[in-house]
Image (cartoon, rainbow, N blue to C red):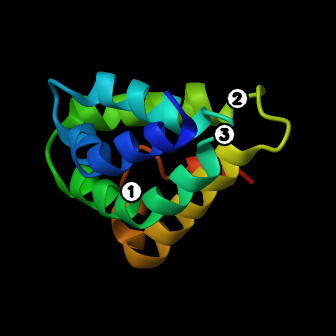
Amino acid sequence: MTVESWLKVFTKLKDYLLVSVCDPELCEDSLTILHNFLTADQLKHQVYEETRELFVKSLELLYTGKEDFCKENFQHYLTENVVNRTEDTDNALKKFFRSVLTKFNEEHSAVLAASNIAGVLEELA
């Protein structure tokens, strides 16, 4: 498939993919799929632009919800696959999540402060 085709697939799936981060049956697989789009060299910057605002809304949904399993999965994903990531020489994934978490903090600081990802923003600096 071409880059344009994959981008079309992502555009059609992104709403479902980001909401499924909050579903205990789907959160692990959705994070894996999302990670593949967020780290695909030819797609990632376009995916970042399309995803940033919606990701903030997904985090609000996740962290105001009661699905601790999904919260733990997301925290584990951030720690293991973003904070500890060394594959990117441009640190694009870290910069993306730093921007998402910064925006989340601006809009929902109390929710972030009470979450299991409260310290991750500093680790992405």
Q: Is residue 98 left or right of residue 56?
A: right
The local secondary structure at tag 2 comes to: loop
Amino acid tagged 2 = Arg
Residue 13 image position (x, y, % from top left): 28, 43
Per the image, the residue denoted by label 2 is 85
Give me the residue at 28% from left, 48% from top.
12
Q: Kindly identify which numbered label has been placed on residue 55.
A: 1
Q: Using the rendered image of the protein, determine whether residue 10 is visible from the camera's viewpoint.
A: yes
The local secondary structure at tag 1 comes to: helix
CA–CA distance in space, label 2 to label 1: 20 Å
- Classify residue 28 by image quadrant: top left
Q: Nearer the viewer, mark 3 or mark 1?
A: 3
- Marks 3 and 1: CB-CB under 8 Å? no
The local secondary structure at tag 3 comes to: loop
Q: Residue furthest right?
A: 89
Residue 34 vs residue 28, the one in the foreground: 34
Residue 110 image position (x, y, % from top left): 36, 69
Q: Using the rendered image of the protein, determine whether residue 121 is visible from the camera's viewpoint.
A: no
- Marks 2 and 3: CB-CB under 8 Å? no
- Marks 2 and 1: CB-CB under 8 Å? no
Amino acid tagged 1 = Phe
- Classify residue 112 by image quadrant: bottom left
Which quadrant: the C terminus?
bottom right
Q: Nearer the viewer, mark 2 or mark 3?
A: 3
Q: Kindly identify which numbered label has been placed on residue 78.
A: none
CA–CA distance in space, label 3 to label 1: 20 Å
Give me the residue at 26% from left, 33% from top.
70
In the rendered image, the vertical position of residue 38 relative to residue 58, given as above or below: above
Per the image, the residue denoted by label 3 is 42
Residue 4 vs residue 82, the one in the foreground: 4
Amino acid tagged 3 = Gln
